[in-house]
Amino acid sequence: MVVTRKIGIRTKGECDLIDITAQVKREVLDSGINAGTVTVFISGSTAGISTIEYESGLVSDFQGMWDRTVPRNIPYQHDRRWGDGNGHSHVRASLLGPFLVVPFTDKTLLLGTWQQIVVADFDNRPRSREIVLQIMGE
């Protein structure tokens, strides 16, 4: 069986990190599927999905890593072409990736104790985002 669900969120942009674990758990629980996998996918090319220990120190470390690895204030060809100033956002999102697959049994996500599912919005402005969940199993 395959069940598709969507989660909508509002973000602040500029490496906003949002914990969506509770919403994903709720959708898996309500899906009617006991065991399988849930694919968590974000639509858009300036945001990504990952897992992290969602605590303030690590959130800050994660954001700082992106500033060091893919800086905002250097020239990007995308910005020259389109003038929207979010070339860094596209590069960051492509490195992180738009999806994550998490197994579950007994309607329980098999995440580690300190592992949460997060959306990272790298765009240079607030956005409305849609996360698609495909829950597959039996």
Image (cartoon, rainbow, N blue to C red):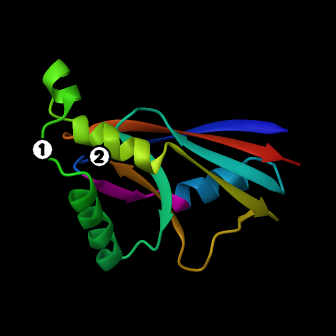
Kindly report the distance in space between the C-alpha atoms of the residues bearing marks 1 and 2: 15 Å
Residue 74 circle label: 1
Image: magenta residue range: 15-21
The question of residue 29 being in magenta is answered with no
The residue positioned 24% from the left and 48% from the top of the image is: 12
Give x and y (percent) for residue 22. 54, 61
Q: Quadrant of residue 109?
A: bottom right
Nearest the viewer among 121 and 77 is 77
Dot 1 alpha-carbon crowd within 10 angstroms: few under 14, some 14 to 19, many 20 or more? few
Up-down: is 44 above or below 134? above
Q: Is residue 9 visible?
A: no
Which of label 1 and label 2 is nearer to you?
Answer: 1
The residue positioned 22% from the left and 61% from the top of the image is: 68
**Where is mark 2, residue-wise?**
122
Give x and y (percent) for residue 130. 46, 36
Identify the element where label 1 is drawn: loop
138 left or right, relative to 132: right
Up-down: is 70 above or below 59? above
Amino acid marked by disc 1:
Ile
Amino acid marked by disc 2:
Phe
The residue positioned 81% from the left and 64% from the top of the image is: 105
